[in-house]
Every structure is written in structure tokens, then in C-alpha cells.
Image (cartoon, helix red, strand yellow):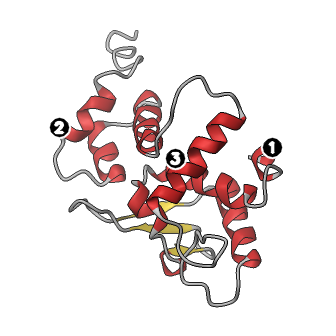
Amino acid sequence: MRAARKRGRRGHRDATMILVAFRHGLRVGELVSLRWDQVDLTTAHLHVSRLKRGRDSQHPISGPELRALRQLKREQAQGSRFVFLSERGSPLTPRGFAQTLSRTAESIAFPFRVHPHMLRHACGFKLANDGHNTRALQDYLGHRQIQHTVRYTEMAAGRFNAFWAD
């Protein structure tokens, strides 16, 4: 995340948004509507309010995320309600984040077009490949129905590794 911080006026905010969206599998609407009252910097927990009738949950915040969020809060005007703000001080829009993500990908010569929902899918596939079970992954991503989660675990490379372990 260090290299991204140094790029552009809003590099730290942009890198933090990408990190938080990926780590928590957030939809773009969940990300841009994230408020400071959902972030507990003391206990390092994030209250995830899911859209699309998803299940809300509490997620732990990792060390790098926690430091990035604390810095972002220090840089914002006192009393800012939303975590991710535009240069005018209003909440960033889904379109604004999509443009930010596209510019970031272009700046590193990413080989194909990206869109915000790819971060949610990347989270699901990463956790499945790390061996997390489907039910836990379902809760983490806030899916009400298991069939929306199965796509991540059915493609996990190591899902059969321990079947015949001696």
C-alpha cells in the first residue's frame, strides 16, 4: 500500500478504499456509504451493513487497515460522518470509486479493465483458497443463500488436498 499512497493527491484514501473493499468483500455501495460509526478503532472491528438483503456482520480490522483508517480519520475534517470523502467533502459515489479503481489499475499497467465488484470476488476466492469453509465464507460475505457462496469454494485449488492425508 505504500507505493499507492505516494501517487496523486488522494493516494492514501484510494489505497485504503481498495484495501477495505478487498479485505471485507464489500460491494461498492457498502464501501462508499461506510460511516465512521461503523468503524471501531479501539477494538479494531468493522460493522458491515450489507446491501441486497445481505446479512450484516462484525469483521476484525487488520493492523495495516487500522493504521490506514486512523491516518485517514486524522486527515479529515472533524465531524466527518463518512469514511471515504470526495475532494469536496461529500461521500464518494460508486461511479467515483469505479473511476478511481480504473485509474489505479491503469497507473500500474494492469492488463485488463477492472470494476469494483472484482474486489468482492477476489476476497471470496482468496478466503476459499485459504481453506475457509463455505458456511463461514457465506457469513463473511453476507450471503443469505449458500449457492451464491459455492462459486468460490468449488474452484478452490486445494479443496481436496486433505482428503487422503496419512
Q: Amino acid at mark 2?
A: Gln
Callout 2: SS: helix
Camera-side mark, 3 or 1: 1
Answer yes or no: do the residues labelled 3 and 1 have beta carbons within 8 Å? no
Which residue is disc 1 drawn over? 3
Which residue is disc 3 drawn over? 22
Q: Which mark is residue 110?
A: none
Residue drawn at x 39%, y 32% is 128
Q: Amino acid at mark 1?
A: Ala
Earlier residue among tags 2 and 3: 3
Quarter of the rendering occupied by the C terminus: top left
Residue drawn at x 64%, y 77% is 88
Res 102 visible: yes
Going by the image, does 145 lie left or right of 110? Answer: left
Which residue is disc 2 drawn over? 147
Q: Quadrant of residue 78?
A: bottom right
Callout 1: SS: helix
Mark 3 crowd level (few <14, some 14–19, many ≥20, 10 Å Cα):
many
Res 23 visible: no
Earlier residue among tags 3 and 1: 1
Earlier residue among tags 2 and 1: 1
- Residues under labels 2 and 1: Cα distance? 38 Å
Residue 80, horizontal then vertical, whole percent: 61, 84
